[in-house]
Image: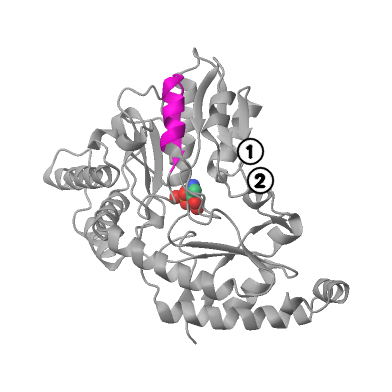
Amino acid sequence: MRKVYLDHSATTPVDPKVAQVMVEYMVEHFGNPSSIHSFGRAARKAVEDARAKVAALINAQPNEVIFTSGGTEADNLALRGVLTANKKKGSHIITSKIEHHAVLTTCHQLEKEGYTVTCLDVDASGLVSPEDVRRAITPETVICSIMMANNEVGTLQPVGEIAAVCREQGVIFHTDAVQAVGSVPVDVEDLGVDLLALSAHKIYGPKGIGALYVRRRTRINPILVGGSHERRLRAGTENVPGIVGLGAAAELAREQMPVQAEKIQRLRDRLAEGLLKIPHSRLNGHPTRRLPGNLNISIEYIEGESILLNLDMKGIAASSGSACTSGSLEPSHVLLAMGVPHEIAHGSLRFTLGRGNNEEDVDYVAKVLPEIVERLRSMSPLYQAASTREGDLTRV
Ligand code: PLP
């Protein structure tokens, strides 16, 4: 059976070139970077070379890059690290309703510990307004965290404008750029951000490794303590194979991004054209300010989960906008924050394209999905009821 992977926002395959260098640093150059002998020195050099490659991808200085265990830890370190180091300034955090749980759950936890959190609304396309950020800032505000690209609907935030508002008001600005890095150009100097989180497994690198960019002179404490690794900001023997893998993936992303982004966007648009012909389907997110590989649609009158299972039976991997919480399906917090009604959010699907996809993949999905939808709708009491009420819905 044909296999089509359209879930690159969940994770990407490790590029074979990345895997190859990782193996070298597991089997051959296995030293501890803190050791002073030749084995240790080889590992240290590899870690520092990787740091330079990650820095180059986002236009940072190498000593502004702290390796972490992934995007989640980078987000936790940014928020908690900055808040505990700036207690004298205040205890107010600004974020948005559409952040990844790595940020949202950290903020909820901090709230329980006595911090105050303002969670900003977004508009119908998923955009945070820089003016809302300005209005939310108080003399107590320490940090504002707004993601660069949303993982569900792909909306790209006006991060540069928000960072400028924060800088003007003396607020530290963090952006979760886990989905943006490697897909769109990210330049920390142009954007003017103070902190930025990224993750290797979204850019054809391994899982369990990421980084936090920390602008020089930003006051921040570690959350993991022990040895003096990572400029005392993240204790623990470095994950050398992971770091080397992230470095190699960053280098490939830098080389390939311009060509790949254009190709991926063309395929995404072709898929959108095919799928949005399905009656009672709609695009979620911003029509143009979105990640090149992201297509999020809602198909009314059926559950996204049933569609996913049927797509899986045809070898197609995608994801839905619902999450299973204590046995029941909860619609995505992102779609709900954008004002998408519950029943439409339940019928949402996310297709995220990547380097390995081609036109045949897209055309296969555009052929298979309408057939699945027709079959499921023919069994859907909701659809039958709506058809009786409104006439033949397929002709609308
Ligand atoms: N932030 C965003 C926007 C993400 O999409 C993800 C992963 O899905 C994360 C953070 C967490 O990254 P990691 O899986 O490396 O912990």
Q: Secondary structure at mark 2?
A: helix
Residue at 55% from the left image edge and 55% from the top image edge: 153
Q: Is residue 355 visible?
A: yes
Q: Which residue is mark 2?
A: 337
Mark 1 belongs to which amino acid? Asp
Q: Is residue 301 magenta?
A: no
Residue at the spot 53% in from the left edge and 25% down from the top edge: 134
x, y percent for residue 101: 57, 45
Q: Camera-side residue: 182 or 114?
A: 182
Q: Is residue 229 above or below residue 255?
A: above
Q: Are marks 1 and 2 in contact (CB under 8 Å)?
A: yes
Confirm whether the magenta stretch covers residue 173: yes
Quarter of the image that includes the C terminus: bottom right
Look at the image and give the residue range highlighted in magenta.
160-176
Give the distance between the C-alpha atoms of the residues marked 1 and 2, in whole angstroms: 7 Å
Q: Earlier in the sequence, mark 1 or mark 2?
A: 1
Give the number of the disc on residue 44.
none
- Residue at mark 1: 121
